[in-house]
Amino acid sequence: MRVLRLGEGKRTTDKLRAGISPVVKFGAEGVGGMTGDRRGIVAAPPRLKLGGKIRARRRDRDLTLTDLANRTGLSVGFLSQVERDITAPSLSSLALIASALDARIHDFIREPPPIQLHHHDETGSAFAVDEGTLRYERLSGSFPGKQLNAIRMDVPPGYRSEETSHDGEEFVFVLSGAIRYILSDRPVDLTAGDSLHFAARDRHRVENPRRSPAVLLTVVTQDLFGEKPSLPRRLRRGTLSVNASLKPNVPRELPK
């Protein structure tokens, strides 16, 4: 009775050492010599990581890294690192990449469902672009005419994002911890209870210089999940306002 056919021992061992999964098949005979209807089990090839998926999509579109950089506003060096899985893009940058490649975020990562009603003790809607980076939780729904995307972000200690810009507006409220936004080379430090509202066309990035995580609520008009027709890029640049909720509600200028 043959139950497994793994090939010759030496050949199988060589394949395992080379990182190649051997083909494993059930024999035609069942247990005790009875014929069975078992199908062959073949080890599946490894799935492409995020960078490999982006590279494959870019090449399928016959685009160079420079073409993709021009379409997204991200640097060639950063995109090259993303494709080699050296670094991972933020959700906002991944949305830019997906749009530039005529794709949606769900073509690259597991996309969370829209949330019409969310209770604070609910779990299961959290996701990440890559393990070890930002952790997101989608808090907004989807319906005709929707303009806003609300996201909760858990920012680990020492995190630094890439610099990016996109159409629309961005609002940030710090739920816990401390965070720093760099807006057009101007640092803005925020702690729990502080908020920030700015034109997302201004180049910006976020970092957590502390040794403890930070939790943010971000609301953007950027089409993160490909749910509305793309809008033409706006050329005008907006202004920035900062509000510290624990202080009197008066306008404050950015530090110079």
Image (cartoon, rainbow, N blue to C red):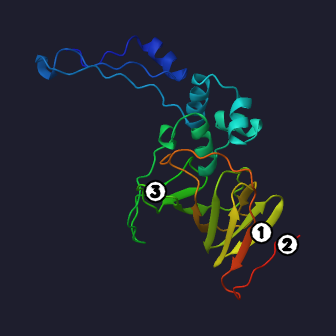
Badge 1 or badge 3: first in the primary sequence: 3
Task: Report the quarter where the N terminus lies.
Answer: top left
Badge 2 or badge 3: first in the primary sequence: 3
In the image, is residue 98 above or below residue 133? above
Q: In the image shown, does 231 or 7 lie closer to the viewer? A: 231
Using residue 122 as the reference point, say whether residue 126 is left or right of it: right
For label 2, the residue is 255
Q: Secondary structure at mark 1?
A: strand
Residue 228 at x, y percent in the picture:
49, 48
Q: CA distance from mark 2 to mark 3?
A: 37 Å
In the image, is residue 157 above or below residue 55? below
Residue 145's disc number = 3
Residue at image x 51%, y 43%? 105
Residue 218 at x, y percent in the picture:
59, 64
Residue 188's disc number = 1
In the image, is residue 42 above or below residue 158? above
**Badge nearest the viewer, 2 or 3:** 3
Residue 9 at x, y percent in the picture:
42, 14
Using residue 126 as the reference point, say whether residue 210 is left or right of it: right
Give amino acid for label 2: Pro
Residue at image x 45%, y 25%? 45
Q: Secondary structure at mark 3?
A: loop
User: Do the numbered discs 2 and 1 sit on residues whose CB atoms are within 8 Å?
Assistant: yes
Q: Residue furthest bottom?
A: 248
Q: In the image shown, does 45 or 145 lie closer to the viewer? A: 145
Using residue 42 as the reference point, say whether residue 200 is left or right of it: right
